Amino acid sequence: MKFVDEARIQVKAGDGGNGCVSFRREKYIEFGGPDGGDGGDGGCVYLQGSKDLSTLVDFRHARHFEAERGKNGFGRNMTGHRGEDKVLEVPIGTVVYDDETDELIGDITEDKGRLLVAQGGYHGLGNLRYRSSVNRAPRQSKPGTEGELRQLRLEMRVLADVGLLGLPNAGKSTLISSVSSARPKIADYPFTTLYPNLGVVKVQDYKSFVIADIPGLIEGAAEGAGLGVQFLKHLSRTSLLLHLVDVAPIDESDPAESFRVIEKEVQAYSEELGERERWLVLNKIDLLLEEERESICNDIVKQLNWQGKVFMISAAANIGTQDLSYQIMQYLDEQAMQNEPSSHAIYSP
């Protein structure tokens, strides 16, 4: 299935039904008086989260959606039927904007959670409503109001606790396949990851977290080069970023410079994302001589003047990955305790 993480749609709520002008007609009752009923309210348009969806591909071709109009009122004081609501299912993690004003309408983060995106029109009034002591035979009624029409922009942002950053071939896909049951495409050439992958990392019973791998960034990504910048929005919900660096690149490029390239692009894309908690993960140490690993890694850290946490791992050989997973789980637990209710999702297996 093609991965679609953004869609534009038009939604139209139902108009309200018109009020009725009617008078009571019965044998032997000469002046029955008004009995026109009100119209029904128009149906509303809702977006509803669904755990069974993982993409917005359903909106790729069908882009216009309309709720049912309210029925008109009837005589004998009969109210028109309310219009049926239109409920559109979207993936959990969908953010909804008004495409014309760029206003944030809402965020769908729960299964079956609903968000009202277009209000239905209100019912019109029948002539019974206008009866008074001085106007016993009113012939006026009120039409229903129009339902709301909106142009929406839907953006799907994956729900993950941890996000992976790095150049193509830094080992992000290998890491997510090493610590979880996710099986992204892995090869010895760049750009094997074309869309975000999610993996659930089980640390112990009832302790797990979700990790997201996005396509690798390249220099100039903030200006549109490459694929990764299109998916950086998926890291906006994460509590922690892991910045993977290949310590033994096949092209003999400088690992410290590779780190700076990604850092520059992330800062250009979003200052807030650039200030997110980030750990340095030096990957592919199995390609270094055992006696040289520590000195080479320390030299990279020194060049970067890095003050945060550092991990030396080999995702392919499963060196240091278990300790990294435990440290992540501990960090997320601490964050959850500090920020009640929890701002990140911890999934039970």
Image (cartoon, rainbow, N blue to C red):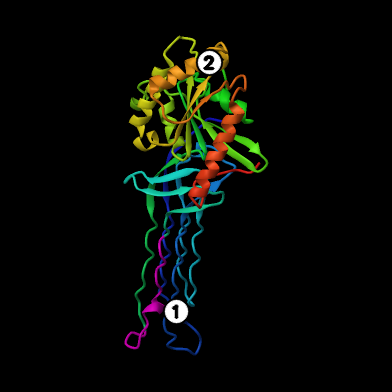
Give the camera-side residue of 61 and 176: 176
- Position of 269 relative to 131 (above/below): above
- Disc 2 residue crowd, few under 14, some 14–19, many 20+, Cα 10 Å: some
Q: Which mark is residue 35?
A: 1
Assign a secondary structure to mark 1. Answer: loop
- 123 inside magenta stretch: yes
Location of mark 2 (residue): 293
Task: Identify the residue shown where x is 32% and y is 87%.
Answer: 134
Residue 326 point in image, percent of width and height: 59, 35
Residue range of the region highlighted in magenta in the rendering: 121-136
- Disc 1 residue crowd, few under 14, some 14–19, many 20+, Cα 10 Å: many
**Toward which corner of the image does residue 227 lie, by quadrant?**
top left
Q: What amino acid does circle 1 point to?
A: Asp
Residue 187 point in image, percent of width and height: 56, 16
Task: Identify the residue shown where x is 46% and y is 35%.
Answer: 235
* Callout in the foreground (2, 1): 2
Q: What amino acid does circle 2 point to?
A: Arg
Task: Identify the residue shown where x is 38% and y is 48%.
Answer: 104
Looking at the image, can residue 61 be seen?
no
- 127 inside magenta stretch: yes
Task: Identify the residue shown where x is 53% and y is 41%.
Answer: 332
Residue 37 point in image, percent of width and height: 45, 74
The residue sitting at the bottom extreme is: 28
Residue 298 point in image, percent of width and height: 46, 19
Distance from disc 2 to disc 1, alpha carbons, whole Å, reads 89 Å
Assign a secondary structure to mark 2. Answer: helix
**Toward which corner of the image does residue 22 lie, by quadrant?**
bottom left
By secondary structure, the bulk of the magenta-drawn segment is best described as: loop
